[in-house]
């Protein structure tokens, strides 16, 4: 094989590898990116659409969830999973249309566990929320949410 032909083949191979890496980076969403998107979702405007999207991360039958609001702690699992959905939607309904402004947001992912800490303010006041999530298979599930 001529040196010029070999150089062209090597250049084509390098270009193909670079193209594959670029496509891989665009297509593959990391856990960090997924959880940052969740954090963006729960700190944006309170709307039925955003609530539904956030609820995709909650299934007490798959991952039991503890909800702490002020001095009240509620636990939901497979036996009362529908109660969680009703409670969450009911308590958030009065806030539909409220735009939140992010003061602080952090996402920490470690293996199959993650924590998200947010602090927002709106015309309703200031709220801090701590989220804990667990990874089961390829999916992330909320295991604890605490409003302070």
Image (cartoon, rainbow, N blue to C red):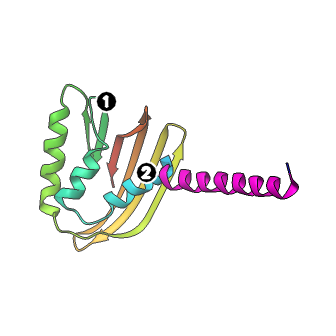
Residue 30 appears at what percent x and percent y? Answer: 50, 48
Magenta residues?
2-29
User: Could you tell me which residue is drawn at 25 percent across and 46 percent down?
Assistant: 55
- Direction from residue 131 to residue 45 in the image, left or right: left
Q: Which residue is mark 2?
A: 34
Q: Which quadrant: the C terminus?
A: bottom left
Tell me: residue 115, above or below residue 124.
Answer: above
> What is the crowding at mark 1: few (fewer than 14 residues within 10 Å), some, or many (at least 20)?
some
Residue 108 counted in the magenta span:
no
As measured in the structure, the alpha-carbon distance from the residue carrying label 2 to the one carrying label 1 is 19 Å
Give 95 or 56, whichever is nearer the viewer: 56
Ranked by sequence position, the earlier of labels 2 and 1 is 2
- Direction from residue 41 to residue 25 in the image, left or right: right
Residue 41 appears at what percent x and percent y? Answer: 32, 58
Labels 2 and 1 touching (C-beta < 8 A): no
Give the main secondary structure, helix, strand or loop, of the magenta stretch: helix
* Residue 48 visible in the shown view: yes
User: Could you tell me which residue is drawn at 21 percent across and 51 percent down?
Assistant: 52
> What is the crowding at mark 2: few (fewer than 14 residues within 10 Å), some, or many (at least 20)?
few
Residue 13 counted in the magenta span:
yes
Give 52 or 110, whichever is nearer the viewer: 52
Give 83 or 111, whichever is nearer the viewer: 111
């Amino acid at each position: 094989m001529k040196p010029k032909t070999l150089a062209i083949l090597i250049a084509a191979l390098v270009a193909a590898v670079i193209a594959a890496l670029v496509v891989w980076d665009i297509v593959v969403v990391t856990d960090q990116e997924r959880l940052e998107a969740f954090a963006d979702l729960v700190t944006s405007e309170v709307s039925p659409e955003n609530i539904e999207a956030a609820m995709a991360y909650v299934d007490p039958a798959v991952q039991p969830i503890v909800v702490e609001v002020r001095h009240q702690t509620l636990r939901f699992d497979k036996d009362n999973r529908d109660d969680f959905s009703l409670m969450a939607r009911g308590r958030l309904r009065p806030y539909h249309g409220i735009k939140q402004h992010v003061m602080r947001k952090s996402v920490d992912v470690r293996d199959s566990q993650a924590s998200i800490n947010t602090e927002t303010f709106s015309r309703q006041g200031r709220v801090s929320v701590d989220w804990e999530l667990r990874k089961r298979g390829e999916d992330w599930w909320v295991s604890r949410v605490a409003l302070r």
